[in-house]
């Protein structure tokens, strides 16, 4: 009898983002958390505070984030997008966050950085749970929640190698006209459902409490 041919093993998928130093951004109307990671143990970095979410605030945040990227030799940004339970942008925060991400992409692209938006559902909830497990003064706890939420965004992004994220690209019309935005999906794989995000958050919080 003929020997059955051995099935060839499928090659491991190429990792697009692991090892790339990345700045995570948890955008807020008054507080924006920042974290950094290459895919291993994302670290909360700092909190950037603004008076509102107007143009001047956006410009300040863009300058600060570009400076952080240059100082840390980062190559890309991941901005958390707070989608609603159905995965849409019907809430107040999501359109404002996307508007900021577009402005960041305009400035970052000119300097060679990539900007991605990432479904951040559950990141703030998990950050609050983790913070509650630590002994912190109130003002320090507030700062840590925002920066830790940015770290959770990176943690989730790298966990699936960015699948489901959007890369924002900005093109200018001939003659220096106004910019227009394009968004390219990194991968067609659907993002986890809201209930799945909640389950993942509870599981990570449990491991955090157990010291895992």
Image (tube, rainbow, N blue to C red):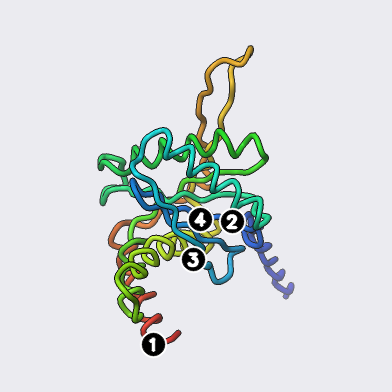
Relative to 174, say whether 127 is above or below: below
Quadrant (top left, top right, bottom left, bottom right) of the N terminus = bottom right
- Residue 24, labelled with which disc? 4
- Residue 22, labelled with which disc? 2
Residue marked by disc 3? 44
Q: Residue at x 63, y 61 (%)?
A: 18
Q: Quadrant of residue 153?
A: bottom left
Sequence-earlier tag: 3 or 2: 2
SS state under label 4: strand
Residue marked by disc 1? 210
Sequence-earlier tag: 4 or 3: 4
Q: CA distance from mark 1 to mark 2?
A: 28 Å
The mark lying in front, picked from 3 and 1, is 3
Sequence-earlier tag: 1 or 4: 4
The mark lying in front, picked from 1 and 4, is 4
Observer able to see residue 151? yes
Nearest the camera: 111 or 159? 111
Q: CA distance from mark 4 to mark 2?
A: 6 Å
SS state under label 3: strand
Q: CA distance from mark 4 to mark 3?
A: 9 Å
| CB under 8 Å between discs 4 and 2 | yes
Sequence-earlier tag: 1 or 2: 2
């Amino acid at each position: 009898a003929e020997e059955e041919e051995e099935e060839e093993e499928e090659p491991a998928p190429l990792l697009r983002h692991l090892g790339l130093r990345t700045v995570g951004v948890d955008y807020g109307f008054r507080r924006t958390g920042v974290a950094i990671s290459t895919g291993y143990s994302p670290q909360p970095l700092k909190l950037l505070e603004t008076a509102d979410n107007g143009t001047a605030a956006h410009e300040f945040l863009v300058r600060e984030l570009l400076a952080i990227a240059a100082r840390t030799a980062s190559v890309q940004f991941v901005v958390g997008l707070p989608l609603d339970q159905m995965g849409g942008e019907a809430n107040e925060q999501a359109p404002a966050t996307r508007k900021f991400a577009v402005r960041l992409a305009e400035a970052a692209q000119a300097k060679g950085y990539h900007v991605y938006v990432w479904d951040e559902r559950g990141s703030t909830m998990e950050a609050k749970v983790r913070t509650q497990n630590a002994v912190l003064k109130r003002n320090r706890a507030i700062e840590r929640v925002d920066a830790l939420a940015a770290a959770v965004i990176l943690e989730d992004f790298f966990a699936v190698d960015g699948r489901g994220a959007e890369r924002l690209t900005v093109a200018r019309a001939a003659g220096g006209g106004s910019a227009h935005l394009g968004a390219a999906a990194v991968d067609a794989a659907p993002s986890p459902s809201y209930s799945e995000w909640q389950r993942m958050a509870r599981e990570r919080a449990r491991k955090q409490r157990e010291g895992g």
